[in-house]
Image (cartoon, grey):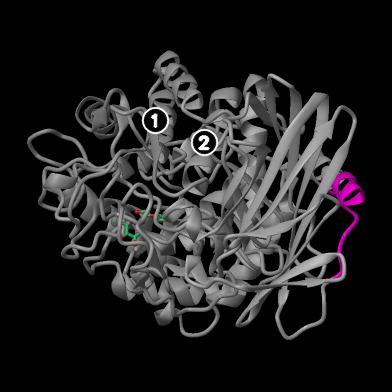
Amino acid sequence: MARIEDYALIGDLHTAALVDRTGSIDWLCFPRFDSPACFAALLDSPDAGRWRIGPSGGAVASRRRYRGGSLVLETEWDTPDGTLRVTDFMPQRGNHPDVIRIVEGLEGEVRVSSELTLRFDYGSIVPWVRRRGDELEAVAGPDSVWFWTTAPVEGRGLSSVSDFVVTEGERIPFVLTWGRSHEKAPHRPDPFHALEDTLAFWHDWNRQETPEGHWEEAVTRSLVVLKAMTYAPTGGIVAAVTTSLPEELGGTRNWDYRYCWLRDATYTLQALLLSGHVDEAAAWREWLLRTVAGDPGDLQIMYALDGTRRLPEMELPWLKGYEGSSPVRTGNEAAGQLQLDVWGEVLDSLFLARQAGLEKGHDSWDLQKALMHHLEARWQQPDNGLWEMRGPRRHFTHSKVMAWVAADRMVRSVEEFGLPGPVQRWRRVRDEIRADVLAHGVSPTTGTFTQSYGSDNLDASLLLIPRVGFLPFDDPRVVATVEAVQRDLTEDGLVLRYRTQDSADGLAGSEGVFLACSFWLVDALHGIGRTAEARALFERLLSLRNDVGLLAEEYDPVTKRQLGNFPQAFSHFPLVVAAHHLTSGEGERSDDAEPHEAEPRGA
Ligand SMILES: OC[C@H]1O[C@H](O[C@H]2O[C@H](CO)[C@@H](O)[C@H](O)[C@H]2O)[C@H](O)[C@@H](O)[C@@H]1O
């Protein structure tokens, strides 16, 4: 079984596939990120669906890479008989999604095999396969998949298999296209033109970018990953392209991340904005305004990519789970949680969008006022916190700080942009929240911020307090918190979200270190002036990326393996932000490109 870090990503901004180092596509959902998978070997065995192309007999690739700053993957094998390359990509979406694989002989003569095992609905349905002219059509229920290649194909067992020899200079294309089973055959793209077009698309996209010093390659790859997780038709952004990759091998902390969290998406937007990708920020803003329209009391912390609200959590008992980590889940119950930080993140992002010139008129201001109005009545309630704890609700310090951010950005929108609103009242709310946090969110014994009111637990989210402008980096409580997290909330120098055994998160088992939190420690160390340590930690985190620059949600420092859903936006956007701060040496606050004063204006 492949390790999580053995996978590379290809995608078409609607959905994505994961390809391992033997040339096996083990995960693919058609037609959308959150559709049922037709290749689900990732969460079970090859019988749950996969498509492997590589040297006959199977072998781990000698090397692989993306072509330039694209999402076109090249995997190469040196064999005793010669060298083989497989180029994998998904062209930009026309009417139907395609996966294209081009087998190329680089040297000598190599015997190759392609083994296609389609299983619809997460491995549960074996389709009926029939020949249609020079193509095969696999059909079951609503899905049909069309398969074309110039290589010979035969049915073997419940798979379609090609065995052939590729010689130096020869290119053998394979095209897999999804369509609705009641519609006529989809148009088949020319694989070689599609390759040129796909490379051109990514080349153009990367041109918009602001380079980040000598970490440019890592930043570019992270931005491409974030772009790949953006659903083009709506501007929604998935947290990851997978479901149920475990936070603990063999454990039950397995969740479906193929949805749009307001928190993850707003942070992604901030990273894209920092790097000059204004179009995606504008598209996401439109998505947000459409999705949260209606009663502000109904604001959810996450939605489907088209704004659908109901995301019922279900288990798929026929799948064993990644390395036996069950259950495999689809949907996510966290959609119904109260997480107060989301108001802060949304209002902060709209404030940033206004600063970036994306808010031309007043069209989002009424919504912002309605959200703030609702928060004024709710900020004193206990919530589930940004870690979506399934244990008892409590007064999470980070949630209250983000409620302060919401009030602060509303006040500043009036002050800086002349927008109309009850600014005196919002200033009072801002002051009240601040006083509440300082009275209840700081431990009298240690002088550090605490996970929740009345507890002495630490929590990595507290590293964000200076970043959002609640207190300056040189405040003694901030410095003490950063040092305490570094000392007491790390494993092998990398940061845990919280100690699972102390935090009543309502779940069994444990988890790895959380990569986003480790990047936040980079930022925090840099902010308190310990830049050499910050840079060393940043370099170490970069070294945890896999061979093609991808990061999962978590990492296990003992087994040295990536853990959790993959690739994970929540790991890639803090990489971009940390690189930006380390490179520019400024901009420590999320809302301000300039170094700042401690007290908010007008407070
Ligand atoms: O740890 C329990 C929770 O784990 C997931 O939430 C995490 O992922 C989210 C998406 O990246 C992120 O926004 C959140 O901060 C993380 O804690 C899962 O989605 C939850 O259902 C689960 O309770």
Q: Which mark is residue 6?
A: 2
Q: Ligand 1 appears in which quadrant?
A: bottom left
Q: Which mark is residue 524?
A: 1
Between 517 and 116, the residue placed more toward the observer is 116
Q: Amino acid at mark 1?
A: Ala
Position of residue 470 measured from the top left corner of the image (x, y, whole percent)? 37, 45
Secondary structure under tag 2 reads helix
Does the magenta run of residues contain 242?
Answer: no
Disc 2 residue: CB within 8 Å of ligand 1: no
Residue 415 visible in the shown view:
no
Between 404 and 84, the residue placed more toward the observer is 84
Q: Measure how far apart labels 1 and 2 are at the Cα level.
A: 31 Å
Crowd class of label 1 (few under 14; some 14 to 19; many from 20; radius 10 Å): many
Crowd class of label 2 (few under 14; some 14 to 19; many from 20; radius 10 Å): some
Query: Where is 137 relative to 53, above or below?
Result: below
- The structure residue drawn at horizontal position 51% and vertical position 26%, both measured from the top left corner, is 542
The reply, left or right, for residue 128 in relation to residue 85 is left
